[in-house]
Amino acid sequence: MNDNKIYTLIHSIVIPELSNTIFMVITATVLSAIIGISLAILLIVTYKEGLRPNKYVYQILNTIINIVRSFPFIILIVAIIPLTRAIVGTSIGEKAAIIPLTIAGAPFVARIIEGSLREVDKELIEAAKSFGASNFQIIFRIMIPEAVPSIISGITLAVIAILGCTAMAGAVGAGGLGAVAITYGYANFDNTVMYGTVFVLIVMVQVVQALGNFSYKVLK
């Protein structure tokens, strides 16, 4: 591949698809975090040792999360195509990919946040109860603030997992760097493009992990 072709490929294909990948990762991470944290709070509240134990609600949520997490991502994308079309009107493109990315990411985040909230010192919770704190106050003024460093680490892992899923989503028309690697690299037997794209993804993972580690140290 000559220099002109490389220049054209980078500026006309790689950079736009890099932007699409970043868009998918950020949007799916935000949505996954919102849904995942909500699920984690419900799990921790309805757990048998939670603030308001309810084994039926806990078991239903626990089962749903386990089922969704058991799906390989590439199969999940195909399985929920009707839902994706109903929400965004299409099953192709980066906007459509956000639906399966969010559905795959939310249970992952929920499990991580649930674990983080369970690690909060129970003596703090009991002390808050003795002072008359409501469940809402215990969750949002004690449990979540105490678990913030662990939550940040969990979100970092979720971002990296979602980034990896965007590459797989490229195989089914989602766009992004995964599509570049498959369409312009693998399909055209061009190792330069394929491994170059992999290198970009590796750099992105390293940057995300470094930012997550830094945030953890600052907040701890």
Image (cartoon, rainbow, N blue to C red):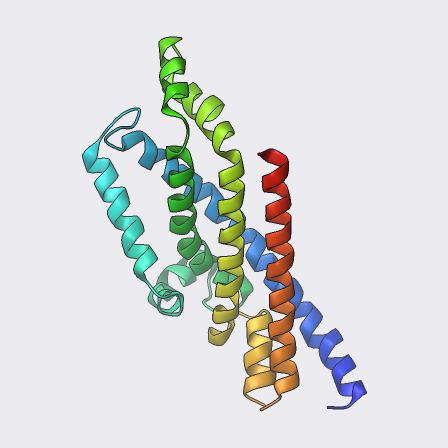
Q: Is 153 located above or below residue 70 in the figure? A: above
- In the rendered image, residue 148, in percent from the top left (x then y), is placed at 52, 34
The extreme left residue here reads 56
Q: Is 137 located above or below residue 28 in the figure? A: above
Residue at 46% x, 58% y is: 101
Q: Is 154 located above or below residue 131 in the figure? A: below
Query: Quadrant of the image for the N terminus?
Result: bottom right
The extreme right residue here reads 4
- In the rendered image, residue 195, in percent from the top left (x then y), is placed at 61, 79
Q: In this orientation, which residue lies closer to the viewer: 100 or 87?
A: 100
Q: How many marks?
A: 0
Residue 44: name its quadrant: top left
- In the rendered image, residue 117, in percent from the top left (x then y), is placed at 41, 34
Query: Quadrant of the image for the C terminus?
Result: top right
Q: In this orientation, which residue lies closer to the viewer: 5 or 110?
A: 110
Residue at 38% x, 66% y is: 81
Residue 198: name its quadrant: bottom right
Residue 197: name its quadrant: bottom right
Residue at 27% x, 31% y is: 46
**Relative to 151, 107 lies left or right:** left
Residue at 41% x, 19% y is: 124
Q: In this orientation, which residue lies closer to the viewer: 31 or 201?
A: 201
- In the rendered image, residue 41, in percent from the top left (x then y), is placed at 38, 34
